[in-house]
Amino acid sequence: MSSLSAPPFALERWFASHAGGSQIDLSSSGAPARTLNELLALATPSERTAFDAVSLGYGAPDGTGSLRAVIATRSSACATADVTVTCGAIEGLRLVVD
């Protein structure tokens, strides 16, 4: 049993009360709400066409082969099979700790 006696969600409430006060917020695990039109307005016409084929569901649990291959090229000592992509930091931390 933990001796910590913080009220439930106290940290989340603190973050929420301080949100938006800085230009860059490294404590946030989410992104500001944007519409699809706002995001697509940032893309070139060819990028917008490419987005038409993008699935909005979760990908492969360890990352698609093409993504892992691109990541592997950033290290001369790493092969595609050595790369695992996680959906968030907590999954990566769990892999490291276990």
Image: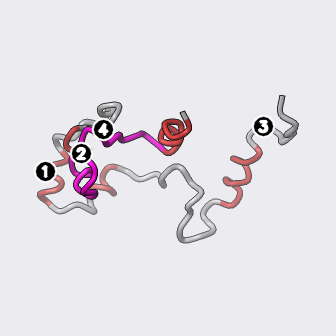
**Residue 79: within the magenta?**
yes
Q: Please state which amino acid type lies under the numbered disc 1.
A: Thr
Q: Is residue 82 above or below residue 36?
A: above
In the structure shown, which secondary structural element does the residue marked by tag 1 occupy?
Answer: helix
Q: Please state which amino acid type lies under the numbered disc 4.
A: Gly
Check disc 3 and report the residue beneath it: 8
Q: Earlier in the sequence, mark 2 or mark 1?
A: 1
Residue 97: percent from the left, percent from the top? 56, 38
Residue at the spot 19% in from the left edge and 43% down from the top edge: 66
Q: Earlier in the sequence, mark 4 or mark 3?
A: 3
- Relative to residue 67, is residue 14 drawn left or right? right
Residue at the spot 83% in from the left edge and 40% down from the top edge: 7
Q: Earlier in the sequence, mark 3 or mark 1?
A: 3
- Relative to residue 89, is residue 58 drawn left or right? left
- The circle drawn on residue 63 is 4
Q: Please state which amino acid type lies under the numbered disc 2.
A: Ala
Q: Residue furthest bottom?
A: 23
Q: Is the stretch drawn in magenta largely helix, strand or loop?
A: loop
Check disc 2 and report the residue beneath it: 79
Check disc 1 and report the residue beneath it: 49
Q: In what quadrant of the picture does the N terminus appear?
A: top right
Residue 40: percent from the left, percent from the top? 26, 55
Q: Is residue 73 above or below residue 24?
A: above
Q: Residues within 10 Å of mark 4 (few under 14, many from 20)?
A: some
| Along the line of sight, the residue nearer the viewer: 36 or 23 | 23
Name which quarter of the figure residue 9 lies in.
top right
Q: Please state which amino acid type lies under the numbered disc 3.
A: Pro
In the structure shown, which secondary structural element does the residue marked by tag 2 occupy?
Answer: loop
The residue stretch that appears in magenta: 69-88
Mark 1–mark 4 Cα distance, whole angstroms, equals 23 Å
